[in-house]
Image (tube, rainbow, N blue to C red):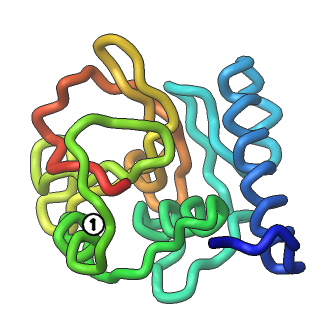
Amino acid sequence: MRSASASPLRAAVLAAGVAALFVIVLIAAGAGAAVAALGGIANPGHTVRSELQPTAAGWPWGQCTWYVAIRRAQMAEPVTWGGNAWEWLANATAKGKPETSIPAPGEIVVYRRGGSYDPRYGHVALVIGFGPGSYTVSEANYYGVGVIDARSISWPDPQVAGFIA
């Protein structure tokens, strides 16, 4: 059972989570320019090169794994496994993280290698929305190293290997 009192670390994590939620609300409201100026996520179809994002220990700056690791840490759901993007599903499962087959906001989508994604490393993104016939992700390095974007993708998506809850 969790304690009712909040530690300074828990308060900081909560504040980061609220800030991330605020960014998502801005996206939904169509405020992509404001978010881009802050080095955050752009509206679907728009991108921003962000050098203002923090570093993530163990993850190379600007890569999809780096971005998702930062965002999950802000959600108090840290990435505790390693590997290339295509290995994340098996590596997270081995660490006890549940795997799902339907996208839900906050989950990590793991893509198969090849197709639209890197044939060697694969790709991961953070699900930020799901609706009839599509899901929306926030990601880095789909359009280039350090480029952060949000895009909607048709569902079902044959390139998805699975989701990490």
- Crowding at label 1, few (<14), some or many (≥20) Cα neighbours within 10 Å? many
Instruction: Look at the picture and state if 28 lies above or below 91.
Output: above
Judge from the rendering whether residue 48 lies leftward or rightward of residue 33; answer left or right.
Answer: left
Residue 127 x %, y %: 44, 41
Residue 144, image quadrant? bottom left
Q: Which of 140 and 128 is in front in this view?
A: 128
Residue 140 x %, y %: 48, 54
Q: Which of 160 and 49 is in front in this view?
A: 160
- Can you say which quadrant of the picture contains the N terminus? bottom right
Outermost residue, front direction?
1
Question: Residue at left 46%, top 80%?
Answer: 59
Residue 113 x %, y %: 12, 56
Instruction: Look at the picture and state if 127 lies above or below 6.
Output: above
Instruction: Look at the picture and state if 12 lies above or below 29.
Output: below
- Which residue position is annotated with label 1? 85
Residue 130 x %, y %: 42, 25
Q: Nearer the viewer, residue 161 or 143?
A: 161
**Callout 1: SS:** helix
- Can you say which quadrant of the picture contains the C terminus? bottom left
Question: Residue at left 50%, top 25%?
Answer: 45
